[in-house]
Image (cartoon, grey):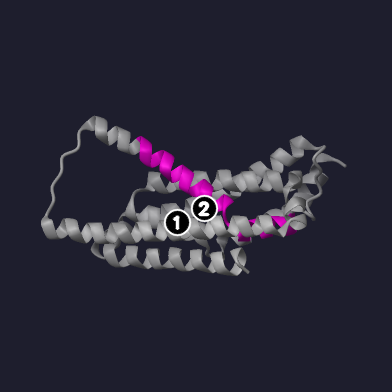
Amino acid sequence: MSSSIIILSFIPTWLIFTAACISPGPNTFLVMSVALSQSRKSALWVTLGIALGGFVWAFISLAGVSQLLNSYPGLLQVIAIVGGSYLCYIGFKTLRSVFASKANAATDIKSTVTNQELQTNTENSRIKNITKGIITTLSNPKVAMLWMSLSSVVPVSTAQMGWLSFYALVIGTIVFCVYGTIGLIFSEARAQQNYLKHSNLINSLFAAIFIALGLYIFFNHGLA
């Protein structure tokens, strides 16, 4: 089979995956939350983590993990329990920041941060955001189920490691482009100005969304 034919055969599943990325889900709300509450760079670091997670899911699914999940449904439940719990954790952490913000506003706390501390905080934030994106993607059972479906129709085998890597790399690129665009939109100055006016309300809304998504995944996929 020629290279052009192989690439053309990949396109339908790439389009299906793109449509799945565009539909709202945990990754979408995560990028929106970080873009509004932190910065454009932070949103792109989260997006990079999500893209790495997408690459890993595509690669391991085509390498045979999807067949393993089909054979052992209990593994999917474990993923759902971990994923649901992690989303609830993000939600409660966001909610805690709302109460902390109110407490700081009430006591009018002022702090000074040195350049070294600022640099350390930036490095930690970068790692945390990448990790957050990776974990959110890898622990999403809906992503696992999507790849259980797509892996059966992607015309590539484990013997074609080069094509398998290329396919997964394109998936990661699609993920970065879709969620990166969302991050760029919601990190615009006007969007962040509106966020600052209603930060506690918006953070409370995001917290509720993360907790609701986490509980839904936990009970409908983890304990079902």
Q: Looking at the image, which residue is at 53% across and 69% down?
A: 216
Q: Position of residue 43 (x, y in %)?
A: 42, 49
Task: Kindly indicate whether the residue at mark 2 contacts the one at mark 1 (C-beta within 8 angstroms).
Answer: yes
Residue under numbered circle 1: 30
Q: Nearer the viewer, residue 177 or 123?
A: 123
Where residue 70 sits, quadrant-wise, is: bottom right
- Residue 30 visible within the image: yes
Q: Is residue 143 magenta?
A: yes
What stretch of residues is rendered in magenta? 123-150
In this rendering, which labeled residue sits more in front, label 1 or label 2?
2
Of the numbered discs 1 and 2, the one sitting upstream in the chain is 1
Q: Looking at the image, which residue is at 36% across and 35% down?
A: 123
Q: Is residue 130 magenta?
A: yes
Q: Position of residue 201 (x, y in %)?
A: 29, 67
Name the side, left or right, on which 59 lies relative to 216: right
Name the side, left or right, on which 59 lies relative to 110: right
Q: Quadrant of the N terminus?
A: top right
Residue under numbered circle 2: 136
Q: Looking at the image, which residue is at 23% across and 58% down?
A: 101
